[in-house]
Image (cartoon, rainbow, N blue to C red):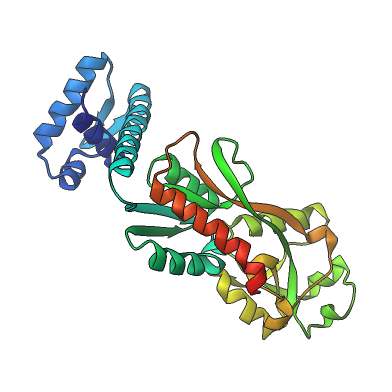
Amino acid sequence: MNERDLRYLVVIAETDSLRLASDRLLVTQPALTKCIERLEQELGAKLFHREGRALDLTPEGTLMVQRARDILRNMEEARQELRDRTSGIVGHLRIGAAATFMDRIMPDVLERMSSEHPGITLELSIGMNDVLRSAMDSNALDMVLGPTSGSEAYDVQNLIDDTVVVVASADHELSGGHAMLEDLNRYSWVLPNRSVALRDWLEKRFAELGLPPPRVRIEVNSLALMPPLIARTSLLTFMSTKMAGGDIREKGLKQISLPDLELQRTFGLLTRRNSYIPSAGRLFMATVRDVIRQRPARG
């Protein structure tokens, strides 16, 4: 068993096809067939079922692919650690971030990283928390910035305590005093897509309170669009006070006082449990923490 065969195995499993794996790896299909045969002979187990040209993993194959990914990741971390000891601070980081972080925090982080650490390159992905964590589990991402709930399987650095509230324009008729839950039935909403955790929490909370689901007029996939939409319309939204940035009144917005519809959460930086963090990664973490510390002073 060697590194090459393990890498071939992972790609074959990801593509379910010798032809596609051959195209990606730039090796011949017979070479990949021999790779499978070598591994199966050494392990004494069948790794794939053949369905025409498609390949399906057996239970033993699924286990071996998982172990192969772990082995390859550990080998790469060992290389990174040795490079850090013998060279300057350089490297490539693959960062996944929730939309709140990407829209509000990352511009300042990227500005600092670009000017202070030009030897570090970054690859950024925005997405839902479960998708980003799965990508990190499969070694497609190095770290994730997002909500920390359900993160027991990861190493976590808490960064921001956040409150998500109902928000309307500053001159909305519900902004004048204490609103009632029943008042919400009269208005339409701007909300993220259904796959977003905030949308899911809000709809479940409406059901728990005996309210009909919010009437969604506009769905957005960029949280940055929400403040100007709300400020100019009678629509409502469910928005992080941190995401709004500074005093939301300066954006023409106002929180609607509805304690039953307030979500408390924490954002943090997640990495794989007990994984090696290269120098580039540690500098990125320190920059994120520093930017967050400075934000209140900057407004």
Q: Is residue 230 above or below residue 4?
A: below
Answer with left or right where residue 39 lies relative to residue 59.
left
In this rendering, does residue 221 appear at all? no
Where's residue 140, x and y in %? 37, 46
Q: Based on the displayed image, in which of its 4 quarters is residue 53 positioned? A: top left
> Which residue shows up at 77% across the image and 59% down it?
262
Q: Which one is nearer the viewer's eye here, 237 or 268?
A: 268
Of 232 and 224, the residue lying toward us: 224
Find residue 13 and report its image quarter.
top left
Residue 182 is situated, as x and y percent measured from the top left of the image, at 86, 68
| 45 to the left or right of 145 | left
The residue under the point 43% across, 54% down is 95
Evaluate whether residue 73 shows in this view: yes
In this view, 167 is above or below 65: below
Side of 282 where 75 appears, left or right: left
Furthest-top residue in this view: 44
Closer to the camera, 242 or 67?
242
Q: Residue at x 43, y 58 (%)?
A: 125
**Residue 7: horizontal and vertical position, in percent?**
24, 35
Q: Is residue 73 placed above or below 285 in the rendered structure? A: above
Residue found at x 83% / y 79%: 175
Which quadrant of the rendered structure holds the N terminus?
Answer: top left
Q: Is residue 175 above or below residue 276?
A: below
Q: Quadrant of the C terminus?
A: bottom right
Q: Is residue 101 left or right of residue 93?
A: right
User: Percent x, y for residue 194?
Assistant: 59, 59
Q: How many marks?
A: 0
